[in-house]
Image: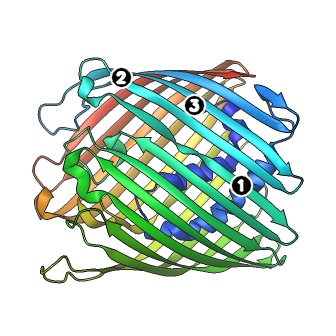
């Protein structure tokens, strides 16, 4: 999403979209308290003076629509026997704000559409975009409280690095929760709770359907005007609908740092430890717990007034789809360059090195894989409410198991129009 609507949504909604798209990363729950506060600040900041389609007293709403035309040479992510198709994706978007009181804000963001595969209709599906949801934020003196319900329904298996050999994987994810922060100037403690429902289709992936209760706490300390450090901890309880993958309790704790030496450069770092404690399934033998160190270093820089670059790299242990957990090392750089007043170039390469022990339904084997590629494209904005984007996405996966490697090329054209 680019252009006027993206600018109106602001960085807070983007942060929520990233969290909502997580495949169940226990240590990512530690980010939720900070992300929710960032989102609340962004929503309050962006209400006044922004474009809108409808305004009634203090209520504002911006509506937009888009049409995406794609061609993929491997919709089934096959190592052999790849199938190609054209896909038509119409979508509608709506974002609304209503300040209930001077210190509280109710906000809604919804994007939904349909993916129509012209030659393989079995792949056609409705979808709800990441970041869709409802949020309510209220400030009471030094305290900020919030409640949210975020959701998405997506069928796009190529975005899940642990999967191969299918294009039909889809999931519905709903995360509802509350958070609170106490701003004591140089010390900011926060607490939060989320309930997640993660429902998978088609039937071949039912084993991954689950619910999770997440509890998390953070405390940040401003040690210098531009440096913040802190501690964080979280606990989660995951229950699966079927007894194929193991119910588990995850515990994590760590430290973080945030450095903003100037208005252009921003550096964040996190490090800690996470452990999954598994329950036995019936009379089956207990399986050993899994633990790992989680690491993340993220650097973003407004290099010039026309070039923005970022880099995120690290290590994590995440809940799996066909395995109890997947161990991932990742590198995710990105760069955007406004080459002309109305033309922006984008490049987002990615690389992940993963390992997982597949369940009995998926072969009961240890898999090591590399998942890499890039999103390349440009956006042309002939008018302030009209965007034209052309994108190319290369995704490649190599595995040490048979029939779990593939390469997919996809090229697309997207037209986005906001009513303002």
* Residue 241 image position (x, y, % from top left): 29, 62
Image coloring type: rainbow
Q: Residue at left 45%, top 65%? A: 314
> Circle 1 sits on which residue?
136
Asked if 7 appears above or below 248 in the picture, the reply is above
For marks 3 and 1, the one nearer the N-term is: 1
Cα separation, mark 3 vs mark 2, equals 28 Å
The residue that label 2 is drawn on is 116
User: Which of marks 2 and 3 precedes in the sequence?
Assistant: 2
Q: Secondary structure at mark 2?
A: strand
Name the residue beneath numbered marker 3.
Answer: 345
Question: Is 39 drawn above or below residue 254 in the view shown?
Answer: above
> At which x and y percent is residue 247?
30, 73
- In contact (CB < 8 Å): disc 3 and disc 1: no
13 displayed left or right of 77: right
Q: Residues within 10 Å of mark 2 (few under 14, many from 20)?
A: many
Pointer 3 local density, CA inside 10 Å: few below 14, some 14–19, many at least 20 = some
Q: Quadrant of residue 338?
A: top right
Residue 123: x and y in percent read: 28, 30
């Amino acid at each position: 999403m680019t252009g006027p609507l993206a600018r109106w949504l602001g960085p807070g909604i983007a942060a929520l979209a990233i969290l909502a798209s997580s495949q169940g990363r226990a240590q990512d729950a530690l980010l939720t308290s900070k992300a929710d506060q960032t989102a609340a600040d962004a929503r309050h900041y962006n209400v006044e003076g922004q474009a809108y389609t409808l305004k009634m007293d203090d209520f504002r709403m911006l509506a937009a629509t888009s049409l995406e035309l794609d061609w993929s040479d491997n919709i089934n992510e096959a190592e052999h026997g790849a199938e190609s198709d054209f896909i038509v994706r119409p979508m509608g978007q709506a974002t609304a704000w209503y300040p209930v009181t001077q210190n509280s804000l109710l906000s809604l963001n919804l994007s939904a559409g349909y993916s129509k595969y012209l030659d393989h209709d079995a792949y056609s599906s409705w979808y709800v975009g990441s970041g869709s949801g409802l949020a309510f934020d209220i400030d009471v003196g030094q305290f900020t409280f919030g409640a949210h319900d975020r959701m998405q329904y997506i069928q796009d298996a190529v975005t899940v690095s642990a999967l191969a050999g299918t294009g039909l994987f889809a999931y519905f994810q709903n995360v509802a929760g509350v958070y609170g922060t106490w701003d004591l100037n140089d010390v900011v403690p926060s607490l939060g709770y989320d309930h997640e429902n993660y429902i998978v289709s088609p039937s071949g992936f039912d084993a991954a359907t689950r619910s999770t209760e997440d509890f998390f706490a953070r405390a940040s300390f401003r040690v210098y005007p531009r440096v913040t450090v802190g501690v964080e901890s979280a606990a989660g309880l995951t229950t699966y609908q079927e007894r194929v993958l193991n119910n588990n309790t995850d515990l994590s704790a760590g430290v973080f740092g945030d450095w903003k030496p100037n208005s252009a450069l921003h550096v964040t770092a996190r490090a800690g430890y996470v452990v999954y404690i598994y329950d036995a399934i019936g009379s089956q033998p207990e399986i050993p717990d899994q633990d790992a160190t989680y690491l993340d270093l993220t650097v973003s820089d407004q290099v010039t007034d026309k070039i923005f670059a970022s880099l995120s790299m690290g290590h994590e242990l995440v809940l799996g789809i066909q395995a109890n957990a997947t161990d991932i090392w990742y590198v995710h750089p990105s760069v955007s360059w406004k080459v002309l007043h109305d033309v922006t170039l984008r490049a987002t390469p990615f690389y992940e090195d993963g390992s997982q022990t597949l369940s009995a339904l998926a072969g009961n084997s240890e898999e090591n894989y590399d998942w890499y590629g890039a999103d390349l494209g440009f956006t042309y904005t002939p008018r302030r409410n009209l965007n034209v984007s052309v994108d190319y996405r290369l995704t490649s996966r190599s595995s040490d198991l048979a029939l779990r490697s593939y390469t997919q090329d996809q090229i697309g054209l997207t037209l986005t129009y906001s009513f303002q």
